[in-house]
Image (spheres, rainbow, N blue to C red):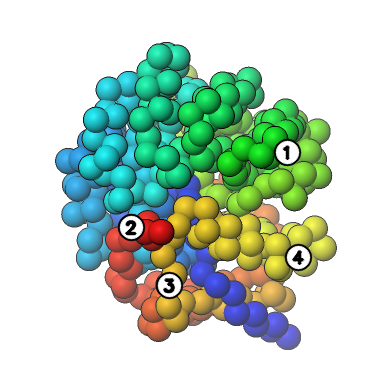
Amino acid sequence: MPKILTLPGLIDVHTHLREPGATQKEDFESGTKAAIAGGYTAILDMPNNPIPTISEEALKQKIKLATGRIYSDLGFHFGATPANYPVFEKIKDKVFGLKVYMNYTTGDLLMEDMNALEEVFSKWPKGKVIMVHAEGETLKKAVNLAKKYHQRLHVCHISLKKEIEAVKQAKKEGLDISCEVSCHHLFLNSDDVKRLGPFGCMRPPLSSKEDQQALWDNLDYIDMIASDHAPHTRQEKETPGKIVNGVPGLETSLPILLTAVAEGKLTIDRLIQLTNKNPRRIFKIPEQADTEIEVDLNEQYTINHKQLFTKCKWTPFEGMEVQGKVKKVVLRGKTVFDQGRVIGPYGQVIFPEMV
Ligand code: NCD
Ligand code: ZN
Ligand code: ZN
Ligand code: ZN
């Protein structure tokens, strides 16, 4: 028997749509179709493209390329470099957050120099989010910078016990800090690396069972679940001698989370907080009127790459049995997903709510 439940559209603050510059992996059309099919009605795109979003021109280019072609709503983050703080004031109202890459990952935006980091943290407009890719010990550096310059810090893809402990500590001290966790770090661990090969490689890497358990044990301190949808082609993933980091996630996160609900690991209310309410509040995402999704809490199926809209057409969750299926998505009163079909494009480029 179907058990249909209506939920608010999911919001993802951490997506890599790869356009411009790497559209063999994903583009605005395929990526926002994947979002809609996965139950996401608004997503935020990361700046680490081959042509990175680090200038006013690059941002305008993304907005222009996306306009009229997107199926979900789509907003953008800006990338920090050691030299681009003079444009912060000009772009601040158009982007949701400033992304600072403090460890090595896909793209060319690594920033390790302390003077440059101080510059960025001191110049970013107060009250707007600074998002960090800061793993392990590096996270302490980010927390100290946020403290020193009274900045709002958002920690991307927490994966280690010591990271969630550091966030917990900073929250107890009253720091304005939030964090996200990705489904691959909640539902996979280092034991899966052998089986998955290159398709289990991402930054931060899959962690130990103990670290994975620490995320579940500290779910109360986690503000949101983000997909870190980071598609690469199969061919790129399988090139010998090359490690390409990142896995897609937009279409698997909700069914996997609904399965966790069915198993009693998560309540529906908490799921809504983690995937809609908190991301909307923390990143000031505008309300979407007449927008909702319908899921069947009872429908069981096996995750299969053939059913995915992402251009990369693979998933680290291939073969997983899930319970909970996205049946219908309504965006501003229009049905945009029904019977497995994505309809549109009816998405809009979005900008942060002014307060
Ligand atoms: C991301 C990518 O490919 O853009 N890769 C990843 O492994 N997570 C970059 C990132 O989020 O660090
Ligand atoms: Zn990252
Ligand atoms: Zn990412
Ligand atoms: Zn196939």
Q: Secondary structure at mark 4?
A: loop
Picture residue at 56% right of the left edge, 63% below the top: 276
Find numbered disc 2 in the image and state the secondary structure of the residue it sits on.
loop
Label 4 – label 2 distance at C-alpha: 30 Å
Residue linked to disc 2: 351
Q: Residue at x 33, y 68 (%)?
A: 347
Q: Is residue 112 visible?
A: yes
Q: Position of residue 345 (x, y in %)?
A: 30, 70
Mark 3 residue element? loop
Question: Mark 3 — residue?
Answer: 288
Name the foreground residue: 115 vs 206.
115
Identify the mark nearer the N-term, 1 or 3: 1
Instruction: Name the residue nearer the viewer: 36 or 219.
Output: 219
Location of residue 204 (image quadrant): top right
Question: Which residue carries the number 1 mark?
Answer: 172
Between disc 4 and disc 2, whose residue precedes? 4
- SS category of the residue bearing label 1: helix
Label 4 or label 2, whichever lies nearer to me, is 2
- Whichever of labels 2 and 3 marks the residue nearer the N terminus, that label is 3
Contact (Cβ within 8 Å) of mark 3 with mark 4: no
Query: Which residue is rendered at x = 23% and y = 42% of the image?
Result: 90
Mark number, residue 267: 4
Residue 248 appears in the rendering: no
| Amino acid under disc 3 | Gln
Quote the CA–CA distance across marks 2 and 3. 12 Å
Looking at the image, residue 305 lies above or below residue 37: above
Q: Nearer the viewer, mark 1 or mark 4?
A: 1
Q: Mark 2 and mark 1: span between their CA atoms?
A: 31 Å
